[in-house]
Image (tube, grey):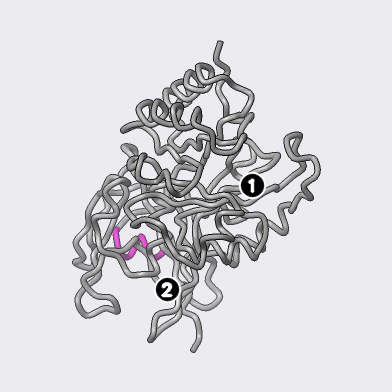
Amino acid sequence: MSRVHVVAAVIRRADGQVLLAQRSASQHQGGLWEFPGGKVEAGEAVEAALARELREELGIEVSASRPLITVSHDYPDKQVLLEVREVGAFTGEPHGAEGQPLAWVAPRDLTSYEFPQANRPIVAAARLPDQYLITPDDQDPGQLLRGIRQAVANGIGLIQLRAPDGYDPKYRDIAVDAVGLCAGKAQLMLKGPLEWLGDFPAAGWHLTAAQLRKYAAKGRPFPTSRWLAASCHNAEELALAEQMGVDFVTLSPVQATQTHPEATPLGWEQVQGLIAGFNQPVFVLGGVGPQQREQAWQAGAQGVAGIRAFWPHVE
């Protein structure tokens, strides 16, 4: 069975809302919602296919797009390769040129819509930002909380409260305050023993590689309504993350770092190869900052993660 090559678009307008289209009842997976797009013809470039499909389906012209995520998915009756691009600028007013219903949806509300199974990673990618801040470990609690407050004010939408010294009670106290600072403004990811999960229902959980190895076979520790992430460094850990059903991962180290000088960097070529075999959003980490965001996108990543490059300067 040959794999059907499809291009899809996460079309985002100025207020951040994303455009969805509903599949007709006669189509494969009929009645479900999807991100607009269609088949890539033989010999056709992906960007050209996207422009053609959106012109035909929605009556718009794409002005700017970039890679978002690539997903391979096997249905019982068909195999698809979905190349997804984020469309940040277009001309024209989208309308259902083929009679299909359309909806503009806030990213946080995407989970209320029913999509084909292959779209689940795309929904995650559409909801996630392109930067992931990890808090530094040389701050006292007051400095940490001031930094988080400033980061949220600066528009950082995804923050990991790092637990560098194991899981001590002080971390829990800081986590309570951090949850409050992020409420309604940014997604906070916590680390720690899974026994703590019930104490922080609003927070997502970021697993260490050791936790991934320990728990992957048991599957997700909580429902898909809560973010689950993991730290990965190689193909084996990425496979475990997929087995566990995580929503996204960090992949590191891309380049040499001062914090982990002993770790062998993966390099951009290997990073690209690892991401190509993985079906969830990936934040690259290690020797990267906001200025590497474009390079990360071209390698197939969701974006960049880091500590120093993203931590705000707070007096």
Could you tell me which residue is drawn at 38 percent across and 26 percent down? 181
Q: Secondary structure at mark 1?
A: helix
Could you tell me which residue is drawn at 74 percent across and 45 percent down? 255
| Vertical comparison of 179 with 273: above or below | above
| Vertical comparison of 179 with 208: above or below | above
Measured as percent of width and height from the top left, residue 92 is found at 30, 49
| Vertical comparison of 287 with 249: above or below | above
**Residue 39's disc number:** 2
Measured as percent of width and height from the top left, residue 29 is found at 28, 76
- Read off the magenta span: 52-58
| Foreground pick, 178 / 133 | 178
Q: Main secondary structure of the magenta part?
A: helix
| Vertical comparison of 42 with 201: above or below | below
**Residue 295's disc number:** 1
Could you tell me which residue is drawn at 56 percent across and 10 percent down? 315
| Foreground pick, 44 / 101 | 101
Residue 307 placement, left or right of 207 = right
Q: Residues under labels 2 and 1: Cα distance?
A: 26 Å
Q: Is residue 92 visible?
A: yes
Residue at the far top in the pictured view = 315
Numbered label tally: 2
Residue 224 placement, left or right of 272 = left
Measured as percent of width and height from the top left, residue 304 is found at 58, 42
